[in-house]
Amino acid sequence: MLDIQKIRADFPILNQKVNGKPLVYFDNGATSQKPQVVIDAIAKYYNEINANIHRGVHTLSQLATDAYEVSRGKIQNHINAKHAYEVIFTSGTTHSINMVANGFASLLKSGDEVLVSALEHHSNIVPWQMLCERTGAVLKVIPMNDKGELVMPEYVKLLSTKTKIVAVNHISNALGTINPIKYMIDKAHEVGAAILIDGAQATPHLKPDVQALGCDFYVFSGHKVCGPTGIGILYGKEEWLRKLPPYQGGGEMIATVTFEKTTYADLPHKFEAGTPNIEGGIVLGTAIDYLNSIGFENIAAYEHELLEYATEKLLNIEDLKIYGTSEQKTSVISFNIAGIHPYDIGTIIDKLGIAVRTGHHCAQPIMDFYKIPGTLRASFAFYNTKEEIDLMIAALQKAKMMLS
Ligand code: 7TS
């Protein structure tokens, strides 16, 4: 059992009032709030060890380098990567996906196929479209059903020896669907395709085991797991990271440079050109430690309780429809009230202190599927409470009265 009040005390922002009302922060899918240990670790880095890494012999540079590499090791342990050098620091999920898609440009030819799913965030669609435009490869889409689940028999039918890479999210940001990724990874490998898992929405809720999953790439963002913005992870299997060309050229990614030829540094540095987000990399390790101290099993169990509680309460509101009713679902609820634009409701409940996201959630194809302009999305974290859900329900009732 989690002591939620004790956990809430770790997050100074949660004590705030917004528009004169206590803040109810239900936009965790967009970004998580930060605990004091993370905020302190940022200050500590700049107060005590700020220096560039991997280049100085001086003490501060060594301290910063050590802290950065210790953090890489923490991420390695957390996701159970075989080697620390399979963990590449990036600026976030979007950057990680672009790095892989860009690398595949050297491996694809006209007529090859790339599979994405109907449930993807734009950042797991657009880089693959760009890759297809560059190479003449064809983008194919794994369809979804009304419940917001991917249709596995259709996925299997789409796979062939033409499929070179599959890119699918672990959890949908717009609907909360948890996809059967282990099955999808195994099926991709049966036809010799690589597979990238977008873990941006999964990593706040569960601990992925990349070796047990067997995925070729797993990517996520620091800011959604209680870490800072501007830092993220690209996990890649060693064989793939060796095969892919570097994304950017510059300092720290080279072994030797002459005007005739450059040879690249070994992993992970081959993919980490330039001065990275040093503080972000170090503090991501602090954030992961914090989440592990709470425990992902506890987080999942408690968030599931919040999901069930909120789902039941929301469905009591007349004319309210929930989008995304998969059996396997995380604590994300997308919904609309008939005849009222989600933006109007979002604006009114913001005045009452409730922060939810409104719109297409960077997943326009999902909105097109349901033929709606967007939804309201409440996404819960382990520091939210049932009392906050009650406040949201009351605010929605009020908004509905005002707008209908
Ligand atoms: N993939 C998924 C599944 C996401 O949910 C997001 C961000 C991204 C990729 C991109 O992550 P970034 O950190 O590189 O921006 N999702 C959301 C969201 O649902 N609301 O705001 C951002």
Image (cartoon, rainbow, N blue to C red):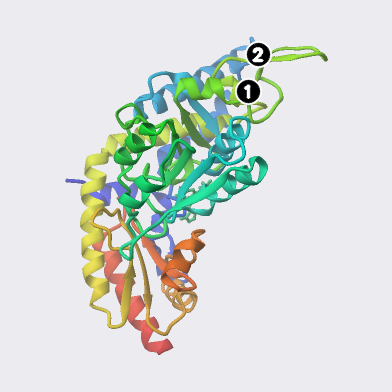
The foreground one among 4 and 389 is 389
Query: How many numbered marks have been drawn onto this rendered protein structure?
Result: 2
- Vertical position of residue 323 compared to residue 260: above or below: below
- The numbered disc on residue 56 is 2
Could you tell me which quadrant the C terminus lies in?
bottom left
- Disc 1 designates what residue? 51
Taking 112 as reference, is 28 left or right? left
Q: Residue 285 falls in which quadrant of the image?
A: top left
Neighbour tally class for label 2: few under 14, some 14-19, many 20 plus, Cα within 10 Å: few
- Vertical position of residue 69 compared to residue 121: above or below: above
Circle 2 sits in a helix, a strand or a loop, which is it? loop
The reply to whether the C-beta atoms of the residues labelled 2 and 1 are less than 8 Å apart is yes
Residue 293's spot in the image, x, y percent? Answer: 29, 35
Q: Can the viewer see residue 221?
A: no
Please tell me which residue is depicted at 30% across the width and 74% down the height of the picture: 393
- The numbered disc on residue 160 is none
Instruction: Give the amino acid at mark 1.
Output: Ala
Work out whether mark 2 precedes mark 1 in sequence or the reverse, and give the earlier one: 1
